[in-house]
Structures are given as structure tokens and as C-alpha cells.
Image (cartoon, rainbow, N blue to C red):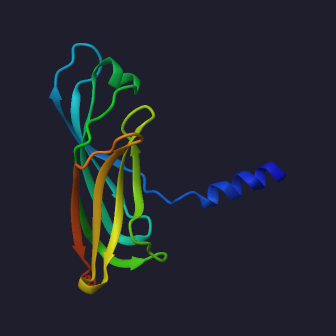
């Protein structure tokens, strides 16, 4: 029982990440063995900001290694976040808070999205980048959402 309480406590302190839903994909390189290289488009909702959805496009490596989950995906990604409903904050926001993370290699490389709030302009700013344990990549993309009143349905 004590072990179960400890496990539940550990899970509660883990950061809250959004999970992505695949919207579509296109093949970019034909592979004779294993899946093709492709670009995937995924969507996720900000876990702390209701009314905001982000769309990511990123490369996925195919072939035998890619099919087995052993390939390292490229660092390039693109992001577009949009207000899709009335914006409300579910919890206090932290500057540079990670809202999405996905593994892009077996162990050492991840892609993440962090959120900033530009209070002066009443705008949410989202940054996507990739890092590696030893050496990160400066490649990144940014998107911004000015928080606007949402029309009431009649």
C-alpha cells in the first residue's frame, strides 16, 4: 500500500504534457524496406489553456530503423497554434513551461513545445525546438496567439 501511494505521489509531480493526435501524413522518400520517410501533422490542445490548439508538422524517418523505432528523426519542425474557442486558464502559467514533448530518437533526442505569455500584448507564444543530450539544435519555429474575445453562440 505504501508503495502504491509513493507511485501515485510521483506521478502527480510529473509535468503535465499534452498528447498529440495525428491529423495526416505525406510520404517524402520511398523506402524498399520498412515504412517511407514522411512528414506528419499532429494536433494537441494546451493542457493549461482551454481554447488553444497547436498543430505540428515534423519529419519521421522510415526504413527498417524507423519502423523499429530506432531511427533518429530530423530536428526540423513547424508549429501553428490557434484560438479555437474562448480562452481560459485552467491553472497558473509558468514562463517557458513545456506543454508538449515527443521522443525523436531511441534515447537521446526529443522535440518539445514551450509556452510563454506576453502580458503586455495579451498574447500566448509557443516555441518548438529539438534537443539532444550532448548537442542540441538551434532549429526552431515560433507561433503567437493574441487572446481575443470569442463570439457567443446564438
> Looking at the image, which residue is at 22% across and 61% down?
142
Q: Residue at x 37, y 50 (%)?
A: 20
Q: Quadrant of residue 145?
A: bottom left
Name the spot of residue 46 as percent of width and height, x first: 38, 64
Image vertical order of residue 133 relative to residue 78, above or below: above
Residue 152 x, y percent position in the rendering: 28, 85
The mark total stands at: 0
Report if residue 51 is visible in the image: yes
Quadrant containing the C terminus is: bottom left
Name the foreground residue: 75 vs 59.
75
Image coords of residue 139 (percent x, y): 22, 49
Q: Could you say which is closer to the camera, residue 76 or residue 4?
A: 76
Q: Residue at x 24, y 50 (%)?
A: 138
Closer-to-camera residue (71/35): 71
Left or right: 93 as drawn, with respect to 4: left
List the single residue furthest toward the right: 1
Above or below, 38 against 54 in this view is above
Q: Is residue 125 above or below residue 64?
A: below
Amino acid at each position: 500500500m505504501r508503495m502504491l501511494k509513493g507511485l501515485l505521489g510521483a506521478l502527480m509531480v510529473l509535468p503535465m504534457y499534452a498528447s498529440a493526435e495525428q491529423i495526416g501524413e505525406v510520404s517524402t522518400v520511398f523506402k524498399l524496406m520498412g515504412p517511407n520517410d514522411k512528414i506528419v501533422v499532429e494536433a494537441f490542445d494546451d493542457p493549461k489553456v482551454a481554447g488553444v490548439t497547436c498543430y505540428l508538422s515534423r519529419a519521421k524517418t522510415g526504413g527498417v530503423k524507423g519502423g523499429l523505432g530506432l531511427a533518429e528523426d530530423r530536428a526540423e519542425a513547424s508549429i501553428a497554434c490557434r484560438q479555437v474557442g474562448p480562452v481560459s486558464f485552467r491553472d497558473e502559467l509558468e514562463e517557458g513551461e513545456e506543454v508538449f514533448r515527443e521522443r525523436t530518437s531511441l534515447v537521446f533526442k526529443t522535440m518539445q513545445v514551450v509556452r510563454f505569455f506576453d502580458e503586455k500584448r495579451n498574447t500566448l507564444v509557443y516555441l518548438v525546438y529539438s534537443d539532444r543530450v550532448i548537442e542540441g539544435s538551434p532549429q526552431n519555429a515560433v507561433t503567437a496567439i493574441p487572446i481575443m474575445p470569442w463570439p457567443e453562440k446564438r
